[in-house]
Image (tube, rainbow, N blue to C red):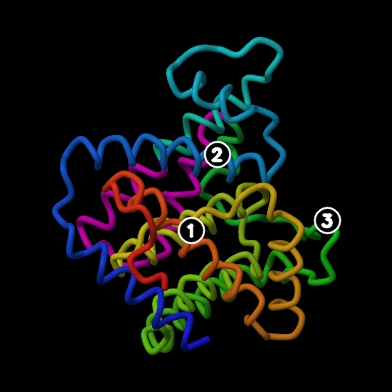
Amino acid sequence: MSDRFSRLDRLKEQLDQYRPLPHAVVRNLHESLVLQWTYHSNAIEGNTLTLKETKVALEGITVGGKTLREHFEVINHREAIWMVEDWVKQREPLSEWLIKSLHQLVLKNVDDQNAGAYRQVNVMISGAEHRPPEAYRVPQAMSDFLHWYHQEAGALHPIERAARLHGEFVKVHPFVDGNGRTSRLLMNFELMKAGFPAALIKVEQRLAYYEALDTAHCTGNYDLFVDLLCDSVENSFEPYWWALGINRQPDSK
């Protein structure tokens, strides 16, 4: 895994050589990122809007035959990305307040009663072997999660740290709904703080993604999930090479 981390570090260093990127490039890449990230993260959770329909919804146009909830999920996710980007610029530390604020935005106008509030009921993750802790254990589990992050996670490579942050958060499954979207936002919050581009888990990867997470939760072995995230991070550089007119990744041979 260290070889993969080294390769990704080199890609980051090579991209950094082109910074600051031209404004037009940044704007175009950002619009594409927000659309792709919103579409894939929502689609993983069952939102039926297609990529093109998601683009239309982001433009404020209602898509016929789709639920109001699905439209709110699109708008909320875009606003959540903006919030994460602001926190990265402000170097906001990970905290319970940050997590609850992010979740509150994810479920805005979708489930206001539970938005930003830890669950009061026990839950099971459909299709997963892992069973999250009972509801009364959630506050302590989240406290332990934040303690781990602030005391131990700093020793990890940023990509492994982002993977474990995502995995340990959904292992607790602190909210009734919206855990997946929130965890992927937190994962990219961590990557972006370290200077990496936001990484997308695509809906086509859903099965491998769920299996890697369940393996990590049941065995403590994060290798599959870290490897999956490494693939996603590497892919996240490709739009930059294309936008900058580089025919192949600079690190390729």
Q: Secondary structure at mark 2?
A: loop
Q: Position of residue 184 (x, y in %)?
A: 52, 56
Q: At label 3, which amino acid type do we have?
A: Ser
Q: Secondary structure at mark 1?
A: helix
Q: Nearer the viewer, mark 3 or mark 1?
A: 1
Q: Nearer the viewer, residue 179 or 238?
A: 238
Left or right: where 206 falls relative to 20: right
Residue receiving disc 3:
126
Q: Nearer the viewer, residue 202 or 118?
A: 202
Q: At label 1, which amino acid type do we have?
A: Asn
Q: Position of residue 171 (x, y in %)?
A: 66, 70
Residue stretch rendered in magenta on the structure: 80-109
Residue 189 is one of the magenta-drawn residues: no
CB atoms at circles 3 and 1 under 8 Å apart? no
Query: Residue 24 falls in which quadrant of the image?
Result: top left
Q: At label 2, which amino acid type do we have?
A: Leu
Left or right: where 249 falls relative to 167: left
Residue receiving disc 1:
235
Q: Position of residue 43 (x, y in %)?
A: 65, 40
Q: Earlier in the sequence, mark 1 or mark 2?
A: 2
Quadrant holding the C terminus? bottom left
